[in-house]
Amino acid sequence: MHFSIQELVAKGVPVELSGTFQVPEAVSSRRDIAAIGPLRFAATAQPLDTVVDVRGRLSTELEALCARCLQSVSMQLDIPFHEQFRKGEEGSESDADEIEVNVVDSDRVDLKPYVEETLFMNIPYAPLCKESCRGLCPECGQNLNERACGCAADRIDPRLAELKKFFES
Ligand SMILES: [Zn+2]
Ligand SMILES: [Zn+2]
């Protein structure tokens, strides 16, 4: 998905950009992601003086594995996207204080890497089926959301067990 900064700035009217991206391998191959749909992107590119302001959203559905109990969880991601672009020399200062302007050396901007970057930064790192998920018992593997197991009751930290032995001897 591309646009030309010069063209937008010359015309001075916003354009709608939308499309679908394949989710990058680095995300789709993650072990805690069972499935992820295509990435839908919709935004408005608005010329502001010499800067093009691109604001919109990206969305997708994904099926992840809960980081604690490994149950599959369906999620809907809806991520805001906001980037600004200006053509200029490398390292030239941007004076926008709210958002950093991406200074690009080519007039034609490909949004794909920016969309992917936004996805990377917003995809849950350790998804949970619910905030209060109790996870699996480390001893017997029982899903503790379903029922309690006997293990936890008399489990003693091995270091404490050593200490107990020491005092008993
Ligand atoms: Zn869980
Ligand atoms: Zn157990």
Image (cartoon, rainbow, N blue to C red):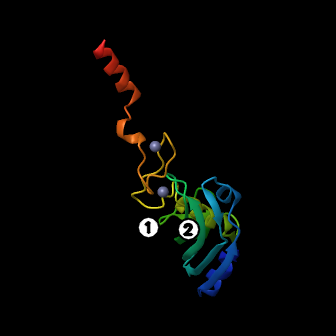
Instruction: Give amino acid for label 1.
Output: Glu
- Residue 15, given in percent of the width and then of the height, sits at 62, 85
113 and 142: which is toward the camera: 142
Q: Residue 11, which numbered label?
A: none
Question: Split into 4 quadrants, where in the image is the N terminus?
Answer: bottom right
- Residue 156, given in percent of the width and then of the height, sits at 37, 32
Q: Does the Cβ of the disc 2 residue fall within 8 Å of ligand 1?
A: no
Image point 38% across, 35% down: which residue? Answer: 155
Q: Residues within 10 Å of mark 1 (few under 14, many from 20)?
A: few
Q: Is residue 88 visible?
A: no
Q: Eyeballing the image, is 26 above or below 62?
A: above
108 and 151: which is toward the camera: 151
Which residue of the protein is positioned furthest toward the front in this rendering? 150
Q: Quadrant of residue 37?
A: bottom right
Image point 62% across, 81% down: which residue? Answer: 9
Q: Eyeballing the image, is 74 above or below 126?
A: below
Instruction: Give amino acid for label 2.
Output: Ser
26 and 17: which is toward the camera: 26
> SS for tag 1?
loop
Which residue of the protein is positioned furthest toward the left in this rendering? 167
Q: Residues within 10 Å of mark 2 (few under 14, many from 20)?
A: some
Q: Is residue 140 visible?
A: yes
Q: Which residue is mark 1?
A: 98
Q: Which tag is nearer the camera, tag 2 or tag 1?
A: 2
- Residue 154, given in percent of the width and then of the height, sits at 36, 36
Q: Is residue 4 left or right of residue 67?
A: right
Question: Split into 4 quadrants, where in the image is the C terminus?
Answer: top left
Q: Which residue is mark 2?
A: 74
Q: Quadrant of residue 29?
A: bottom right
Q: CA distance from mark 2 to mark 1?
A: 34 Å
Image point 44% across, 61% down: which residue? Answer: 130
